[in-house]
Image (tube, rainbow, N blue to C red):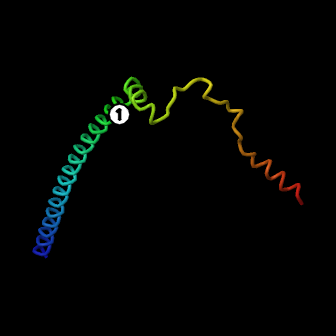
Amino acid sequence: MKIVLHLSGIVLVAVCATWAYRVNYETQEAQNRLADLRGEIASEREAVGVLEAEWAYLNRPDRLRALVVAHADVLNLVELQPENFGEAAMVAFPPDPEELVDAAGDVE
């Protein structure tokens, strides 16, 4: 009986050791993947920062004004004046759904 108990204990220890070994290496692999992902995120953030800086550089008002002046004959662009803007009252908004329901109810 003692031999069976000792053998089952040894088997249990071997199974637990194998399980702990696998979990250890899976954890290390997950940590390596995490470090790789963090590196990729950092490089993508840096790329986004560079792109935002380039966008800000390209959208400088003085640069855009020079481009408009240089290509004014082709683009037919004019400077915006206050007269170019309308008021909200000038927009034809669709009727409210409640008004449509009331109008449909009167048809009966």
Q: Is residue 89 left or right of residue 23?
A: right
Task: Count all numbered tags in the image, as a single digit.
Answer: 1
Q: Is residue 78 left or right of residue 102?
A: left
- Quadrant in the rendering for residue 2: bottom left
Q: Is residue 88 above or below residue 29?
A: above
Work out whether residue 86 or residue 37 is closer to the camera in this orientation and state it. 86
Q: Is residue 81 left or right of residue 66?
A: right
Q: Residue at x 45, y 32 (%)?
A: 73
Q: Is residue 20 above or below residue 82?
A: below
- Quadrant in the rendering for residue 23: bottom left
Residue underneath mark 1 = 55
Q: Is residue 35 above or below residue 16?
A: above
Quarter of the figure with the C terminus: bottom right
Q: Residue at x 14, y 68 (%)?
A: 9
What is the x, y in percent for residue 66? 39, 26
What is the x, y in percent for residue 71? 41, 32
Work out whether residue 98 or residue 103 is closer to the camera in this orientation and state it. 103
What is the x, y in percent for residue 88? 68, 32
Q: Kindly identify the amino acid type of the residue bearing the numbered disc 1.
A: Trp
Q: Is residue 85 left or right of residue 7?
A: right
Work out whether residue 29 or residue 59 is closer to the camera in this orientation and state it. 59
Q: Residue at x 24, y 47 (%)?
A: 37
Crowding near the residue tagged with mark 1, few <14, some 14–19, many ≥20 C-alpha atoms within 10 Å: few
Q: Which SS class for mark 1?
A: helix
What is the x, y in percent for residue 107? 88, 58
Q: Residue at x 44, y 36 (%)?
A: 74
